[in-house]
Image (spheres, rainbow, N blue to C red):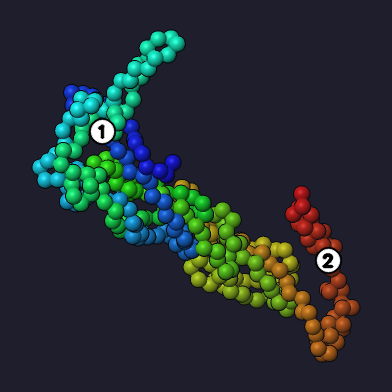
Amino acid sequence: GFGGGFSGFGGFGGGGAQQRRYRGSDLRVKVKLNLKEISTGVEKKFKLKKYVPCSHCHGTGAEGDGGAETCPTCKGSGTVIRNQQTILGTMQTRTTCPTCGGEGKVIKNKCKECAGEGIVYGEEVVTVNIPKGVAEGMQLSMGGKGNAGKHNGVPGDLLILVEEEQDKELIRDENDLIYNLLLSFPTAALGGAVEIPTIDGKVKVKIESGTQPGKVLRLRGKGLPNVNGYGTGDLLVNVSVYVPETLNKEEKKALEEMEGSDNFKPNTSIKEKIFKKFKSLFD
């Protein structure tokens, strides 16, 4: 959980008895990353408002040389035995000592700055190295960077939740990136060069003459790295062709003259490929 409370047992001395150490609660922060930061990894700094060890008593909770003494209730064991009458007779149960909270010691002269707690509310700047390839919803953990524990106890952890900034042009699909390219009809028919956005800037890609809608161009290694270090994804360019919505007289006449040409009649094999690809989207 993310709350405070007690951790496992740790020794404070006292004749080998097991005393409980306070554990600070965990802290949780969110970090929003763009595709560039995800592709290279990035260093982020957080100014955290949290509990830190009291500088006046150095986390002990004691004023000056007051120190701590063995708890008179539990004699330093951190636990007490309670007798309870039941129908089966008297039963003994061992519970946490109410006087010292299981620590086995009590502060004689409490620190004035922290009221004997050993911690005060302050702030700390924490630097976090985000590895490359992380994704939305992943949670990273930094041990010991959460809230400090009372009386020099165990500090909690810092939990970093990753959020992705949506890119304007590129769509993420695990380690691959997808770009939807809309070609003009002349470029699709005649071929040419177009600029494709990538994480590292624009690159020129050659378009073959007669490129059909639905064609996918694959730019190897232009995707995102795997967070576990197993290779890099690709950039997939989905090709669509724009059909003009309005035409002037000259444009209409030119297209009407071309319509009778055999080259403008749909190729049966290409038509089958397009329909097959379309059908696969619903299988």
The residue nearer to you, when weighing 181 against 257, is: 181
* Position in image of residue 242 (x %, y %): 73, 74
Res 264 seen here: yes
* Position in image of residue 278 (x %, y %): 77, 58
Mark 1 residue element: loop
| Residue count near mark 2 (Cα–Cα under 10 Å), binned few <14, some 14–19, many ≥20 | few
* Position in image of residue 127 (x %, y %): 33, 57
Cβ–Cβ under 8 Å for marks 1 and 2: no
- Of the residues shown, which amino acid type is indicated by label 1? Cys
Left-right relation of 1 to 175: left
- Of the residues shown, which amino acid type is indicated by label 2? Asn
Q: Is residue 25 above or below residue 134?
A: above
Q: What residue occupies the far right of the structure in this picture?
A: 260
To which residue does mark 2 refer? 267
On residue 100, the disc is 1
Q: Residue at x 71, y 69 (%)?
A: 240
Q: Residue at x 83, y 82 (%)?
A: 255
Left-right relation of 263 to 135: right
Q: Residue at x 58, y 68 (%)?
A: 169
